[in-house]
Image (spheres, rainbow, N blue to C red):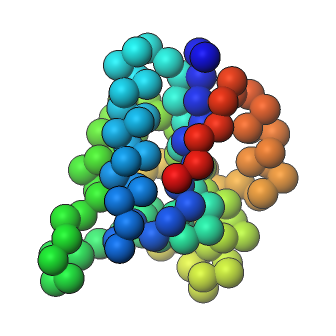
């Protein structure tokens, strides 16, 4: 396996999925693999600006995601997932440089990777 698409499907809080997905992506980067991240379903919530989850007793996922961006990982968010949640692209944190795509475009992107891992 030389490349992987990591798909974030869960909300960043109330699950360990976002952190575990970030760790897998970081591990693959260390192994010099080509990695991209796609955010679908409730996973798109992780990309929103101004997360301050300390009030509910958890840490923000921003540092983990920012590390991936700084390492050159491409981020994709499915537009339909945003719309279904009443969100827009303007609500996403600009630091992630997220590309908004359709679910059909995600299928095409997925074909560019050797494996797809869902969290």
On the rendered image, what quadrant is the N terminus found in? Answer: top right
Vertical relation: 67 (above or below) 39: above
x then y, percent, for residue 112: 74, 28
Q: Nearer the viewer, residue 119 or 42?
A: 119
Work out whether residue 94 can be spotted.
Answer: no
Residue 15 shown left or right of residue 76 in the figure? left
Vertical relation: 1 (above or below) 6: above
x then y, percent, for residue 3: 59, 22
Residue 104 shown left or right of residue 40 in the figure? right
Work out whether residue 57 can be spotted.
Answer: yes
Please report the residue visible at 40 percent of the width from the left and 15 percent of the height from the top: 31
Residue 81 shown left or right of residue 36 in the figure? right
Please report the residue visible at 55 percent of the width from the left and 36 percent of the height from the top: 36
Vertical relation: 65 (above or below) 34: below
Q: Nearer the viewer, residue 101 or 17?
A: 17
Q: How many marks?
A: 0
Q: Nearer the viewer, residue 57 or 88?
A: 57
Residue 64 shown left or right of residue 79 in the figure? left
């Amino acid at each position: 396996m030389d490349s992987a698409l990591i798909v974030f499907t869960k909300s960043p809080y109330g699950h360990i999925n976002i952190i575990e997905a970030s760790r897998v992506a970081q591990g693959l980067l260390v192994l010099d693999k080509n990695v991209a991240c796609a955010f679908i379903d409730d996973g798109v919530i992780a990309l929103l600006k101004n997360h301050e989850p300390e009030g509910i007793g958890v840490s923000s996922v921003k540092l983990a995601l920012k590390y991936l961006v700084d390492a050159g990982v491409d981020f994709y968010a499915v537009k339909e997932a945003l719309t279904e949640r009443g969100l827009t692209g303007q609500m996403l944190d600009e630091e992630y440089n997220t590309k908004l795509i359709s679910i059909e475009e995600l299928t095409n992107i997925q074909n560019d990777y050797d494996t797809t891992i869902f969290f």
